[in-house]
Amino acid sequence: MNETLTEPSFYWYDFETFGLNRRSDRPAQFAGMRTDMDFNPMGKGEIFYAKPTEDYLPHPESCLLTGITPQLCEEKGMVESDFANEIWARFNQPETVSIGYNSLGFDDEVCRFLFWRNFLDPYSHMWKQGCSRWDIFPLTCAVWALRGNGIKWPLWEEIDPVEYPKAEGRKGVCFKLEFLSKANGIVHEHAHDALSDVEATMGLARLIRQTEPRLWQWAFENRTKAKIKAALESGRPVVWISPKFSQESGFVRVAAMIGVNVQNVNEVFMWDLSKDPTVLSTLSEQEIKERLFVRRDELPDGPVYRLQVNSAPFVCNNLKVIPADRAERYGLDFNTIIENYRKLLSIKSLIEGPLLEYAESRERPEPSDVDFGLYDGGFPTRDDGVKKEEVSRTEPDLLAQMVHDGMKFDDPRLDELLFRFRARNWPDTLNEEERERWREFRQHRLMEGDAGQRGVLTIGDYFNAIDELQETSFEDERAQEILEALYEWGERLGEACTN
């Protein structure tokens, strides 16, 4: 039998969420659209809503920003399990590149924790069956830093702070998608509406490919983990462009790899070659560790950075990618950089010992809540992996019966996660004891909170936030309507977990 070949495609997507914490806040709306590699649609754009669960309160500020209330999601949405499965199926269609704007900085992690909570593989869309990820935001920064004469770049100083208060006092180029779209005539009718953001991202990507076709193609072909590792191991300095670096420096660092994190082989340590590394030869191993791994607020500009090779960073091992005039603008002296690279090679062995010792000694604290425990506890055993797949495809009533018959995981965290999974999606399948357990869990989370639940609101915090926003938006009728709906939602959840 001949295998059916799947055509490579982009799946453009965006989330609107009920908060800004990628691990603990829940998605409200998802939009996506599939195109071929030339941006020709392969179907219509689609929007999904997720029904909110009774163990979570939205952040009122996020609701004001998007206009999405929990009542709207309850009316239009599907239970989180179905919501997660719809998205997972699209991301995992063979040869799919899931792509967005700042997606690897936010949306992709929202996805991973969504998949984790719903017993779906959180990583398969990154590598399996030819699937991969890409992010237009770092590429946009690279286009501006290296080329970009065919694109209009909006300035913060030109944005009316009355229209957008966060523009107050800011300077430089604004890389917010809504303002880039507006400056370049890209249709973006409703910022913070997921499908509108998807369409705007596609428009910006199309503009980049039209104006800088060679850079677009090079970035796409060199985004993979294998290509990044090859560049880092090529024996040459690399140009690394990242939004986390300052705009004044062009978002650019010229750097070299000095080691791999043994606890996470996808993380490598990079030396900023604008810094002279010979100072390390005069230090003890303890002093080297203190110098290399200081707190960011003590030494925000390096010289050591962490790079994720599997997150499609913009990394090029050819210094000629930076035009001479841009290098001068960003204060890059290539002669100094090459000399520092030679010095680094000569003393690299001094760094490797403390680097390895540091990486091996780092301990991740145990999470206080399984909802946020994706990165803790290692990968599941083979038996647990089989059971997780079984959970994801079993009907709710049968799944309840399996649990009541004694189904257990090797990792006890997954037993708790399974309980919450069933309670959030199909509470009618809980027996009397489980219903009381679920009520007590919700009461503790919403009424008392937990220091380990980073970003999770208690009822008290929730109502305080609503009160503050009501005072500052008294004359805004739309805002008052949303806040009134949120107040009613909070009262409903509070009553549900105490009765």
Image (cartoon, rainbow, N blue to C red):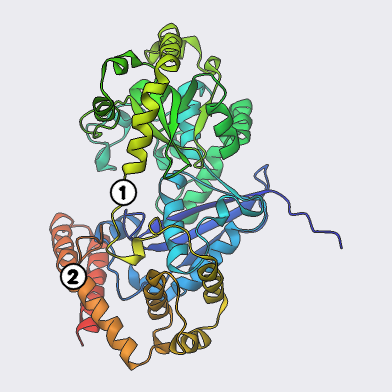
Amino acid type, mark 1: Glu
**Which residue occupies 50% across, 17% down?**
322
Residue sitting farthest toward the top? 335
Disc 1, SS? loop
Closer to the camera in the image, 102 or 258:
258
Among the two numbered marks 2 and 1 on one chain, the one whose residue lies closer to the N terminus: 1
Answer whether residue 332 is visible to the viewer in this image. yes
Q: Is residue 281 above or below residue 469?
A: above
Left or right relative to 67: residue 484: left
Q: Which mark is residue 363?
A: 1
Image vertical order of residue 420 relative to residue 436, above or below: above
Residue 151 in sight from this viewpoint: no
Q: Which residue is mark 2?
A: 459
Name the residue: 28% across, 84% down: 437
Residue located 59% across and 63% down the image? 89
User: What is the total number of numbered labels drawn onto the structure image?
Assistant: 2
Determine the residue located farthest toward the bottom in the rendered image. Answer: 432
Residue 177 in percent (x, y) is at 43, 41
Q: Nearer the viewer, residue 176 or 264?
A: 264
Q: In which quadrant of the rendered image does the C terminus lie?
A: bottom left
